[in-house]
Image: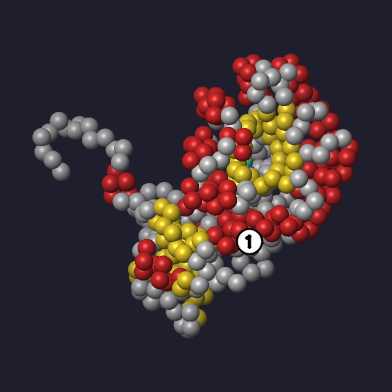
Amino acid sequence: MSSPYHLQGIPTTTLADEFGLPLYVYDADRIIDQINQFRAAFRGVNLKIKYATKALTNLSILKLMRMQGVEVDVVSVNEARLARMAGYAPGQIMYTPSGNAWTEIEEAIRMGLRLNVDSLPLLEQVGETYGSSVPVCLRINPSVADGGNLKIQTGHADSKFGIPHALRADIARVVAHYGIVVEGLHVHTGSDFKSARTFLQGAEVLFDLAGDYPDLQFMDFGSGFKVAYREGDHVTDMAELGAAMSEAFGAFCARYGRELELWFEPGKFLVSESGHLLVGVNVVKQHPTRTFVQVDSGLNHLIRPMMYDAYHEIVNLSNPAGTPTTYDVVGYICETDTFATNRVLPEVRPGDVLSIENAGAYGFSMASTYNLRSRPAEVLIYEGTAHLIRQRDTFEDLTRGMVDVDLLNTVETI
Ligand SMILES: *Cc1c(COP(=O)(O)O)cnc(C)c1O
């Protein structure tokens, strides 16, 4: 079992000593476990996992995925370039734009990526420019929603994503007009659906639509698999979903007359729990109504609490047996910058190392250099050894690209 205190047998605080703080640490075993759990849930179908690169965008993580037989979904050409560096063949990379520039789409096509088309105008343009020579996948918006956080839902009718299912006839007309080969259908209902039922509703929309397209190779059901951020959180029951989806998909393939591949694009599910953001405590200060723990990190490194009101467990690695005390854990950014409010932790002292849990997905990949702060280093623990997989930004990294125009035309130097 993994514990925040020991990762693959390595005492976590020694990583802080070795690599410095703040530090992102990822446990490869945890990622591999999640992949295996995913596969186990979908036994009996022709499953392909396409890791959503944007969740944790690091060369070594992509290499780990590739070693595990996991392919990738990318949302930008730069992510695709990184996937190529990690050894992926173009055909293993699904490119899912969201209103991206036509010049970038053309580049993706030149690179030989698989193209997921997210709008009718883009479908037109691909047809007009490439006719039948570029196969496409169609990203359909099924107008399915299931409560939860609106910021991370993508499958409801008012969401910007995909081609509305209501335009079914228009899609078919454009496809027929240009002779476009439709090799896949895609739906991604976002990261906050609550039940297997919502997933199956989205699936039924695609199964029905498949009747319009005889050349399908795969159906891509995106992602949206939840993991627990705190005890008692609703999570996706993978076994239940896998069994229900496998059965529904099997029945669909029988109707369709051919065995298709079943694709998923998990991001958060594969990497969230592997990640720990280790931070150091700078100051503990008592105000009349609350006690603040001020750490050497902030929303520049992990924006989820401020952006999504996300809850992240926090562990005091340095003083696990301390007296339980209530704190607000806050960052050092000059804005409201709160990791946790009214959180009970074992007594926190200056110099303690805290671990912010579940930091693997949308942690580093959404980090910025706001306040001209360095982004943390990243470490991957693989087969019992800690590997530095990204260096901490230096001051030179932060200022690279700034051009000194000498506006005042002075000869003074700073
Ligand atoms: C972000 C994204 C995913 C991954 O979503 P998770 O909730 O992290 O699993 C999958 N597919 C597409 C197209 C995405 O944009």
Q: Position of residue 121 (x, y in %)?
A: 64, 23
Q: Secondary structure at mark 1?
A: helix
Residue 210: quarter of image = top right
- Identified at 61% across, 52% down, the residue is 68
Q: Position of residue 305 (x, y in %)?
A: 52, 58
In the displayed structure, 205 sits above or below 328; it is above
Q: Position of residue 329 (x, y in %)?
A: 45, 67
Residue 392: quarter of image = bottom left
Query: In the picture provided, is 66 more to the left or to the right than 282?
Result: right
Query: In the picture provided, is 59 more to the left or to the right than 201?
Result: left
Amino acid type, residue under disc 1 in the picture? Asp
- Identified at 58% across, 62% down, the residue is 30
- Identified at 80% across, 51% down, the residue is 44
Q: Nearer the viewer, residue 244 or 112?
A: 112
Is residue 259 in sight in this rendering? yes
Query: In the picture provided, is 254 more to the left or to the right than 206?
Result: right
Query: In the picture provided, is 405 more to the left or to the right than 332?
Result: left
Is residue 298 in sight in this rendering? no
- Identified at 45% across, 63% down, the residue is 386
Q: Which scheme is used to colour this image of the protein? A: secondary structure
Q: Position of residue 402 (x, y in %)?
A: 29, 38
- For label 1, the residue is 33
Quarter containing the N terminus:
bottom right
Quarter containing the C terminus:
top left
Q: Is mark 1 within 8 Å of ligand 1?
A: no
Q: Residues within 10 Å of mark 1 (few under 14, many from 20)?
A: few
